[in-house]
Image: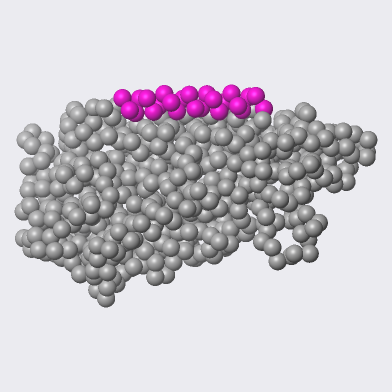
Amino acid sequence: MAKFRVRVSTGEACGAGTWDKVSVSIVGTQGESPLVPLDRLGKEFTAGAEEDFEVTVPQDVGQVLMLRVHKAPPALLLPLGSLPPDAWFCQLLPGAHLRFPCYQWLEGAGDLVLREGTGEGTGAKPLADHLPVTHSSWKTYIQGWPHCLDQATVKDLDLNIKYSAVKNAKFCFKVSSAFTELKIKGMLDRTGLWRSLREMRRMFNFHSTPAAEYVFEHWQEDDFFASQFLNGLNPVLIRRCRSLPKNFPVTDDMVAPVLGPGTSLQAELEKGSLYLVDHGILSSIHTNVINGRPQFSAAPMTLLYQRPGQGPLLPLAIQFSQSPGPNNPIFLPSDDKWDWLLAKTWVRNAEFSVHEALTHLLHVHLLPEVFALAMLRQLPHCHPLFKLLIPHIRYTLHINTLARELLIAPGQVVDRSTGLDVEGFSKLIKRNMEQLNYSDLCLPEDIQARGVEDIPGYYYRDDGMQIWGAVKRFVSEIVSIYYPSDVSVQDDQELQAWVREIFSEGFLSRESVPSSLDTQEALIQYVTMVVFTCSAKHAAVSAGQFDSCVWMPNLPPTMQQPPPTSKGQAWPEGFIATLPPVNATCDIIIALWLLSKEPGDRRPLGTYPDEHFTEDAPQRSILAFQSHLIEISRDIKERNQGLALSYTYLDPPLIENSVSI
């Protein structure tokens, strides 16, 4: 006979408590005990309760390995089988010397198998291969895309990956209030053109931010146009230009008014002061039909010049397509005001398409879903990488399933209101998948590959590199605790299965990304990439969407006239006729307003209220990580005090731990 003291902690979330009866059995090196009920006088397992139980088992089970938790309706309710299942959120089951981290919902009758949370090792413990991790499976949503969770709607999701009741209620309220407001104003049903730029200003009555006001005031200025390639919502395309592409025949005469006397294109190329943004991936892309009218797209190339010292980055030239010729002129700052403004607006439309399909949807939603689902399928809950990564996948499967319901499904927002529709998005994603490299996902390597290590005023780079460094230091400490050598990395079959499944299901077995990890350093880099992508990178390319788009001419989701084939054809009326119709504008602004701000139940980067790690060493690393993030935030706030437009998207308290919106 053996006795154990079991403390059960129930979560505080809405609906976390249960009336069902809970029993436990102890699994050890010498066998498993019978189920023993956790029962006292009165109701157990109310929300927020911590309760102690003494468990007596008839035989010694040896060294404790696992705890099996069983939940079932009380006997008097069993005949009433039509009652809805009663869910319970179990947080933690500590015994006298043992801790079993849980943090899971158990809906209806069923079992949880929990491994003991302390001790050393990499998670490859006895019985590891025999424990269920998750029953979730993969599906192909669109051929050529990363695979995703095989669930059609959020109502089908397991409670453990759904939004909390609070977050879901706040999200639904935001959706309904936004649609109601614009419906009452008659904008959602207006299929025609905007009457004027002045009328578009009315959208600021919807919602506004200081950054959005700044966009409205400065959107026509060349230096602001250029700065958005550095610190706007798509700060990942700009790269140093050492030689002009052959299909972009810019001449000295064209750019002399901006470069000034005493220099030339070749001289500036050799200095490294010229930069290129190439949207060539948009070439020959499928375009949409909105309100019965065909839409248009361009694949522009934009040449930029960094003035000496701390001068602003400025645009030098814009070409609308990848094929030079008499019908594809190069537009210049010295052109007529409306010609040049229209040229910049076509570039901003290209930015919308590439950002929403690739930088946002593919890189910080579809790939994090792969990281998350592979983790849930391959890493048991006691595995140190599960404990490290679980905060960074919170709600990701919910928001992505919702996106497949409401955004990228046929007839939904992307089909209704963007210039490319789902077919165009799909083509872009397939093209990008074919050329995607592992280094593209690792910020230091990406910055170096694009040659933008020293361009001034690049706050996405500056803040991102600080956060990458903090995450890498934290990950390095955790890895060093559980993986004392390269061999321990190689021998962890659960870890290797996780990486292999990401390789096959996410990257579709493309050899440009790793399919296994052989060293501590490789593991640190890989996990840093995952955490950074799911938190900081998502914040950098998502949180600014509404700021950039609420003044629609700064980020038009579609264009209703074809790109001009000659200069001197633009005028105010034609400019407005090229912009999206009223209903498409409102549709997109509502969507990006929802996707830019967390509706509630936030957990900023480095916030880990669930104690998955129970040992002292990782707890010390978490505290050090949090202190490092506080220092970074202090530096960012101090820097921002001197900026006309603050860059806040990578301020750690504003970064969510995970892709949850």
List the single residue furthest toward the front. Answer: 42
Residue at 20% from the left image edge and 62% from the top image edge: 579
Q: Is residue 656 left or right of residue 393?
A: left
In front here: 412 or 513? 412
Picture quadrant of residue 38: top right
Residue 324, above or below 62: below
Q: Residue 597's spot in the image, x, y percent?
A: 38, 46
Coloured how? Answer: one colour
Q: Residue 367's spot in the image, x, y percent?
A: 49, 51
- Specify whether residue 632 is painted magenta: yes
Q: Which residues are magenta?
A: 615-638
- Specify whether residue 363 is painted magenta: no
Locate the N terminus by quadrant: top right
**Most common SS among magenta residues:** helix
In front here: 644 or 439? 644
Q: Residue 504's spot in the image, x, y percent?
A: 58, 55
Q: Residue 343's spot in the image, x, y percent?
A: 16, 55
Residue at 44% from the left image edge and 51% from the top image edge: 170
Residue 538, above or below 477: below
In front here: 271 or 296? 296
Q: Is residue 415 left or right of residue 555?
A: right
In front here: 305 or 112? 112
Tally of numbered discs: 0
Residue at 55% from the left image edge and 40% from the top image edge: 391
Residue at 28% from the left image edge and 61% from the top image edge: 182
Picture quadrant of residue 650: top left
Q: Is residue 626 left or right of residue 129?
A: left
Whether residue 322 is visible here, answered yes or no, is: no
Whether residue 612 is visible here, answered yes or no, is: yes
Residue 504, above or below 270: below
List the single residue furthest toward the bottom. Answer: 292
